[in-house]
Image: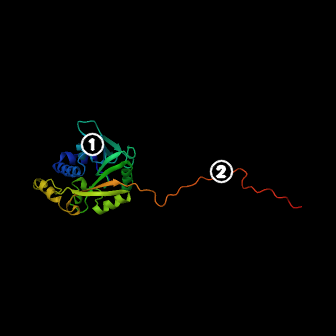
Amino acid sequence: MHLDVQDLRNFYYRSALGRAAQKSLRDRMLELWPEAKGQTVVGFGFAAPLLRPYLKDARRVVTLMPGPQGVMPWPAGMPNTSVLTAETMWPIETGHVDKLVLLHGLETSEHPSELLEECWRVLGPGGRALFIVPNRAGFWARRDITPFGYGRPYSPGQLETQLRKHQFLPERQIGALYQMPSGKRVWMQSAGLMERVGRHMPTMMAGGAFMVEATKLVYPPKGRVERSTARRAIDVLEGIAEPKAKPI
């Protein structure tokens, strides 16, 4: 079940913990994708807080928000790029996306397989997708005071297995959200230190979320490809036996 867009906006833009989470996720994403010059960048779910760095140089930035979640205009003070869409029927042509980011989209989806098929469809040759999900072993998935406490959390192995089943090749994996999921001052003051230290720890042990970068696989035809020969035209009367004399 998708969260309400108002709750997501209040968390990421109007709370100290949400702004810290936004910074952690965005910084880690930019380590993988520092730029998107001349590219088409699409976010699904509630990926808007992460996509602002690409607005300047990308050819196009689109934020798709699923119907059950709701939509909000984004970015503030600029032409709107947000689109309300069906979860598994995006208004994007096949193979036109260079970079695709999913945040609060996969773990809350009621149709994850169909959603991954749609991700595969819109991604272009050489395109890359970044799937951001709650870490099943992390503290953030155990508390419902943040959006990461809702939906189905994943382990890194579970997500990679699901991606491979839908013709994605996982390339890189990194963690994020190493600070505690609390707005208390003592934890907020130590957030920066915990983020720096946590990046040197295994993803499944420390991170509240993790990111898997994947590319699109296009399989060649299986088996041996043989040339088929055209069938010979058949005359109208071909194959009809000559009439035999009727015995007297």
Determine which residue is flagged by label 1: 37
For numbered disc 1, what is the local secondary structure?
loop
- Picture residue at 36% right of the left edge, 45% below the top: 96
* Image quarter in which the C terminus is found: bottom right
Picture quadrant where residue 162 is located: bottom left
Residue 99 in view here? yes
**Picture coordinates of residue 110, whole percent (x, y):** 36, 54
Eyeballing the image, is 64 above or below 181?
above
Q: Which colour scheme is used?
A: rainbow
Q: Does residue 111 appear to the left or right of 130 in the view shown?
A: right
Q: Name the amino acid, label 2.
A: Ala
Determine which residue is flagged by label 2: 233
Residue 109 in view here? no
Q: Which of 202 and 21 is in front in this view?
A: 202
Determine which of the numbered discs, if any, sits on residue 10 in the image: none
Eyeballing the image, is 55 above or below 247?
above
Mark 2 → mark 1, Cα distance in angstroms: 57 Å
Q: Does residue 195 appear to the left or right of 114 in the view shown?
A: left
**Picture coordinates of residue 216, whole percent (x, y):** 36, 53
For numbered disc 2, what is the local secondary structure?
loop
Picture quadrant where residue 160 is located: bottom left
Nearer the N terminus, badge 2 or badge 1? 1
Q: How many labels does the image show?
A: 2
**Picture coordinates of residue 18, whole percent (x, y):** 19, 50
Q: Name the amino acid, label 1.
A: Lys
**Picture coordinates of residue 207, whole percent (x, y):** 21, 59
- Picture residue at 36% right of the left edge, 49% below the top: 125
Mark nearer the viewer, 2 or 1:
2
